[in-house]
Structure formats: C-alpha cells, structure tokens
Image (tube, rainbow, N blue to C red):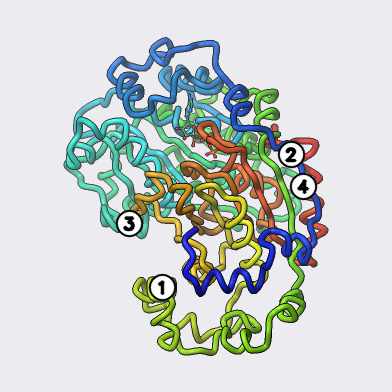
Amino acid sequence: MRLSNRSLTRLHLFCPQPGRRYLHSSERVYSRGFDNHAKSLEKDVARSQVDSFEALGLHPPIVSALRSAFPHIKSPTKSQETLIPAVLAGNDIFLQDRTGSGKSFGLVLALLNRSRAAKITLSSIFIVPHRDLAYQIRRWVARLFGHRASASSMNKVVQVLVRDSRDSGGSLRDDDPPHLLVATPQALLDVWRQQPDALRLKTLSAIVVDEADYLIPTVDLAHRRADDTMKSQHAGKTREFLNLVYGTSQSMDDDEIEPPERRRSPQLIVSSATMPRHLVDYVSEDSLWLNRDNWVKIYGNATHARRRASLVTHSVLVVHDDMIRNIEGAISKSRDADDPWFRSGRVEADANENADNDAVWQHASDESSDWHEYSKTISPFNPLALETIATLFATQVPTTALLVIPSSAPVQRAVFELRAIGVNAHGLDLLHDEQVEAGSSRSNPILLVCTWANTRGLDLLDLSHVFILGVPEGGKRAYLHIAGRVGRLQSRWNGHAVMLVSPNEEATARGLLGSLKQEAVAVAV
Ligand SMILES: Nc1ncnc2c1ncn2[C@@H]1O[C@H](COP(=O)(O)OP(=O)(O)OP(=O)(O)O)[C@@H](O)[C@H]1O
C-alpha cells in the first residue's frame, strides 16, 4: 500500500498497533476455515480423469490457443470434463459447481469450438448479470486469440452488449455479428426492440444464462401459490428475453393446459454455483425454454468442493456505531483539530487547504469533480468500518483484495474515503482497468471496490481477501457468491472472506456463518 506521510499519520493515529486495535475495538465474532498453505490448494483442485481438452472434443486450434494463452491450465476440471462434451452434443444443460471451478471458462471454450452456420450468423449468446462479467469474458477470449487477431477480427469472435456500453454503443452491426455475444438481459431486450433482426434468433445455436439463479429469480412452489404477486415481482428481463426466444410459458396456475412443444433450438445452458430446486423446477417444468427430450444436469464434485471450500476462512467483525467515540479518545485534541477528516464522519475542511501536502488527495481530486462534493457531505459509511478495512488491508493483503459494499452504496465515495486514509483503492472497472488484468504487486497492493450486485462471476487475478460491508441481501446464497471470489482455481493464496457488520446485523451474520458449517460450498439441489 502506498501511503502518503499524512495518511500514515492518520493510520497510526487510529491504529497505533496496526491490526490489533481493531480486533480489540471491533468485536471479533468468530472465524471458520483452515489457514492451509497455497500448496495444498493446488493439490485439491478437482482434476478430471481426462487429461486433455482434445479428448473432450475441442478442436486442435482452440486447444493450442488455450495452451499458449493459459499455460497453467493443463487439464479440464471435473465439471468441464462433462460439460464440454454436453455443450458440443447440443444438450440443454443445468450446470452447477462451486464458485471458481471453471464453469464459465469451460462454457466459453465449448461455445467458441462450435462452428457457425454462416459467417454472418451470431452463434451464441452468453447472458450475464453485469457489465464487468461481460468484459471479463471478452478478456478471456481476447487472451485466447489475442496473439493472432486484430481488434476488428476480434469483434468477429466476441462482442459485449451492455446497456451502458462505452465501447460498442449498445448496438449490434447487422452485417457483422460476432461468433459469441456476451450481454446483459436489458441490453438484449433493447436491441431486440430496436433491431430485432440483429440477434438472428432463428439461426442462433446456443444461449447461456450464467448466474442463472440471480438472473431468473424464482420462489418455491409454496410461496408462489401463497402469494400471487411473486410472479410479477420476479419476472425479470432474462425471463422476458427467453420467452421471446422460446415462447411464453403457460399460466402457472393453469395446471390443466398441456404446454405446447418448444422449439428444439437454440440450445439452453443454465449455470450457477447455486441452483435452487425451484429454479430447476421452473425452467424444466413451467417454462417452455427447455428441450424436454434432451437435457442433462451436471453437478460438481461435492467432496472436492468441500475440501476447496475449507481453504477459505470466513470471519465476521462487528463494528459498533459508537466505537468512533472511543477511538477519538485515543487521538490528541490538537491532532484531531488538525485532522477533521474523520470527526463524526464529516469533513469540514476545504479540500484545497490540504492539497499541497496531500498526494492522495491531489490524486483523488484530479479524477473527478465529485471529489470536491464528497468533502462537504456526510459520509454514508461508518468511518470505523473503513478504518478497519484499511488496517486489515495494510497488514494482511499480499497483493489484491476486493471490498464489496451494499448495492445502493456509492462506489466512488467509498474509493474516495479509502484513498483519503491511504488505501490504494479503485472502483472495479474491467473495461479499462489494466491493473486488474496484470495483477498488482506486493509493493503496491490494490483494493478493488464494487457492489454486492456486481460481484457475481468475477474472476480477479491474485485476490486473497474479500471484505464484505454488511450482510448481503439474499442471505447465504448471495454470501456464497461474494465469498466465492477468493479460493478460486488459479489462486496463489488461500482465501479470506471478512464480513463487517453493525451490531443489529450480528445475529443474522452469525446464523449465516453457522449455516456454512453444514454446507460449506454450493447449495445442492
Ligand atoms: N481446467 C482448468 N484448470 C485450471 N484453471 C482453470 C481451468 N479452467 C478454468 N480455470 C481458471 O479458473 C478460474 C475460474 O473460472 P470461472 O470464472 O470459469 O469459474 P466459475 O465456476 O464460473 O466461477 P463462478 O461460479 O464464481 O462464476 C479462471 O481464472 C480460469 O482461468
């Protein structure tokens, strides 16, 4: 972490013994998991019996691109061993394996392997919940083919379609569709409405719904029957798009009506680390999306999954609201007057007064005009929680950590406040942030900040810690996806998930952590 002198002083003011004070002043609830070494993690990777991708049906050019772009990927994982042939055979698929087990990566390989019906035909659509995941998938493909493809030829292989797209303009060129389109559901619907022919649904051969339980929210039968409003409440954009492609489902209450036969294509692949039974029931029984004669379930190896999950520690810190007062007691009055930054969470000094001797501040104010506004308004964050994260980051993170904040919380504001206390924080941006791709270094660790809603599926290089502010909406399932950003296949480090909660969230957090004991990985169907 690069700290300006001023920031260092701040950290020391609040934390004379970095690491200790917080664990003392915040109440550590408990921590589970085993802090094994990264070596053992390597051993526990769920390896397939099939040791070559060729044996699964991938074409030699794809395999050789894989070998040169991802030399560490030697053999398929267990679920890739099953899913790649199933994709190539054209089966509809339910795919569930733990976070970081290579599901999305395996799907991308298999889809790229398929030949297009014609050069000007879109072959597959990969639906993802947020733009960063879309850019991540495009990066994988660019890395696979990057050494031999120009930017324009790359566009023929993969394009991203997201609503706030800053590079493709959110539209598809009718005359030049990519082999693989990675898109968010809203952006797909927008294109469908404006240029329905651009998606070429008639010749499309596959649709993947990644993070399916998030994109197709369902409730169990009992709730659905008890509360009619659930149907419209959970009717999402993905559902709307799939209904456009495959036809509209019969009324859920109308058990009398025999569902009409759905079309046989495109192939549908529904994937997630957590696959609740009611989602499987809904897709396979209530919707018309699935080819009922030709679908398979592929579920990960629970033993391996459990072993790997034990390499992630799960901890909770309770940060008390009034703790800031206790800490103020540790700060000399004169220093406090000099340093109004954290006083009651409100900044009263004009930014320019501090600019000369504060490199962090200067850097921050260069980046956005918002910075000045932030300095005059009350922070939505508990300063003690941010200080705790700063301390853990400074003392424990080797290269990269992720801070996940509530979906409604402002990312840039969190970045601003963390930088103000000397943390090398950045809003996550996989379109622009080369640092994420290159990985950060031990001399300058990086803290990436994003919201709960934007973590699904992310595969960030070198991540060792994920700090979670608050108890995620969506309970255990949401938590597993956020904590699942660490302890992934390629990771050099053991993973640590640290949740920081307020006292009134403590019981929920305890319950959530307790529930991981019975089932430390994915929710089994
Ligand atoms: N066969 C393999 N051997 C080693 N590493 C692999 C293999 N396949 C994929 N990986 C790596 O594993 C990481 C995780 O892949 P991926 O994001 O596809 O996992 P996932 O199961 O989709 O995770 P999530 O459920 O969180 O979305 C990637 O960095 C990828 O490069």
Q: Indicate whether 253 appears above or below 454.
A: above
Where is mark 1, residue-wise?
359
Between the C-alphas of marks 3 and 4, the distance is 40 Å
Residue 376 position in % (x across, y down): 50, 86
Q: Nearer the viewer, mark 4 or mark 1?
A: 1
Element assignment for label 1: helix
Q: Earlier in the sequence, mark 3 or mark 4?
A: 4
Q: Are marks 1 and 2 in contact (CB under 8 Å)?
A: no
Where is mark 3, residue-wise?
165
Q: Indicate whether 36 appears above or below 358.
A: above
Element assignment for label 4: strand
Inspect the image, locate mark 1, and give the three-letter code of the amino acid beneath it: Ala
Q: Earlier in the sequence, mark 2 or mark 3?
A: 2
For image coordinates 55% across by 30% down, the residue present is 101
Where is mark 2, residue-wise?
33
Q: Earlier in the sequence, mark 1 or mark 2?
A: 2
Q: Earlier in the sequence, mark 1 or mark 3?
A: 3
